[in-house]
Amino acid sequence: MQGMDLALAQITERVRTAAADQTPLRIRGGGTKDFHGLALHGEVLDTRVLRGIVSYEPSELVVTVRAGTPLAELEAALAEQGQCLPFEPPHFAKASSDAATVGGMVAAGLSGPARASVGAVRDYLLGVTLLNGKAELLTFGGQVMKNVAGYDVSRLMAGAWGTLGLLTEVSLKVLPVAPGEATLRFDDINQADALRKLHAWGGQPLPLNASCWVQDGGVGTLYVRLRGAVAAVEAACKTVGGTRMDNATVAADWTACREQTLPWFTARAAQPGHALWRLSVPATAPVLSLPGGAQPLVEWHGALRWVQAPESTGDALREAARAVGGNASIFVAASAGGTSASGTFDLQSKALEHIHARLKHSFDPAGIFNPGRMARAW
């Protein structure tokens, strides 16, 4: 038996035994996102033995990769062909020895600064192979975007945090790296004016790729990244204005925004008891009235607003978000650690909770996969 087949057979047998004994399993790749979710329970089932790129057709813009493959390894292989994962998945590696995995990327369903312009992880997920809670190896989707078989089950795995099954392989659509790029900076601009500019630009045919408004020392700054054809980017620079920044220099700042290592994020360490809240709202939502006059960091052209505040302000934050048609959840709890997740998912609808519970029971009837990670009941 080949090495990879043997590794999969061993994992399959472990899942079968766990289902029979009702032993909880904690599916884990690099563990770089252990800080998120309600809890971490069960015996660790390490996916990193399932590693390697199975197939890659640059001309077809499709790659199939095993779930335990380091995300950086996949990105490097794509970069050699001038291609990328356009949704910029965060790694959240805290040390050089940490390595986010492709399976973890899909399971978390998190996207970076370009999310509002190019789409999310699930939009590039063509197919998956997974082990369900009965130790059955199932394949959904394929290697093309069109799916005529009914429900697109593959996309259910994006953001499921391993509660529905153990991913073994995923197929992804990739895209060429944009030939043109520019970052523009707008100094001394308040949040309301920044949102107005972003809303106005959003209604124009501009290659707007990412944006970030942040307040430092009481002074707000807006950063806007343009990507696309060289001619389109150059024309947009003249239309939009601002101060053009050096691409090589600012690239590290966009990475820091993606990885939440900007000074705004790291300042939370000096505020004991503060959690990092994620507010998802319509991009057209106005400035929100936040408890304690908190100033958010704004991404996704206004649709994503990060807030640092005590967990006791949760009701006020959720109400502020829901008032404009959005939601709020704890992304990093004040007490979160490497082995203790305590962020929360904001499942507002009882009907939605019921659907999640039924899906969980269908894929994992014994409830062995990542119990309590998304909901205390399962």
Image: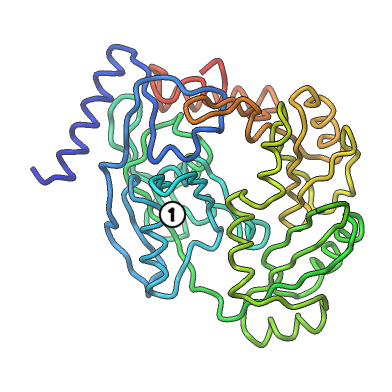
Query: How many numbered circles does the render carry?
Result: 1
- Which corner quadrant of the image does residue 268 belong to? top right
Q: Nearer the viewer, residue 150 or 176?
A: 176
The residue at the far bottom in this view is 231
Instruction: Name the side, left or right, on which 51 lies relative to 319.
Output: left
Q: Residues within 10 Å of mark 1 (few under 14, many from 20)?
A: many
How far from the left and from the top, in percent, is residue 51? 28, 49
Residue at 39 percent of width and 19 percent of height: 42
Percent of width and height locating residue 264? 72, 48
> Where is residue 376 shown, x and y percent of the image?
56, 17
Query: Relative to 250, is 357 above or below?
Result: above
In this picture, residue 360 sits left or right of residue 223: left
Q: Quadrant of the N terminus?
A: top left
Residue bearing mark 1: 126
Counting from the top left corner in percent of width and height, residue 50 is at 27, 44
SS for callout 1: strand
Depth check, front residue: 347 or 306: 306
Which residue is found at the position 60% from the left and 22% from the top? 354
Amino acid at the residue labelled 1 = Leu
Residue placed furthest toward the front: 270
Check the image and tell me how it is coloured: rainbow
